[in-house]
């Protein structure tokens, strides 16, 4: 399970329903990221991943 930082809880938690997405980066490149929700408060969580 992936972990990400929840801004509302101010703690690292496991991501509920993780989903990998692509976002725009500098110079028109694509960056990988992980999105999901916090299991405690339901806030959206976001984590930028490294390159493949």
Image (cartoon, helix red, strand yellow):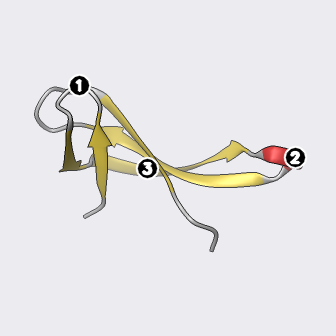
N-terminal of the pair, mark 3 or mark 2, is: 3
Q: Label 3 to label 2, Cα distance in Å?
A: 22 Å
> The residue tagged with tag 1: helix, strand or loop?
loop
User: Residue 45 vs residue 39: left or right?
Assistant: right
Q: Residue at x 21, y 48 (%)?
A: 12
Image location of residue 3, percent across then percent down: 28, 56
Q: Residue at x 67, y 53 (%)?
A: 31
N-term-proximal mark, 1 vs 3: 1
Mark toward the viewer: 1 or 3: 1
- Residue 32, image x, y percentages: 60, 55
Q: CA distance from mark 2 to mark 1?
A: 31 Å
Residue 31 sits above or below residue 5 on the image: below
Q: Which residue is mark 3?
A: 19
- The image quadrant of residue 16 is top left
Q: Which mark is residue 28?
A: 2
Residue 21 point in image, percent of width and height: 56, 48
**Residue at numbered disc 1:** 8
Mark 2 surroundings: few (<14), some (14-19) or many (≥20) residues within 10 A? few
In the image shown, does 35 or 48 lie closer to the viewer?
A: 48
């Amino acid at each position: 399970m992936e972990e990400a930082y929840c801004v509302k809880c101010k703690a690292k938690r496991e991501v509920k329903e993780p989903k990998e997405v692509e976002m725009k980066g500098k110079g028109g490149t694509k960056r990988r990221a992980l999105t999901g929700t916090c299991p405690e408060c339901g806030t959206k969580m976001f984590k930028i991943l490294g390159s493949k």
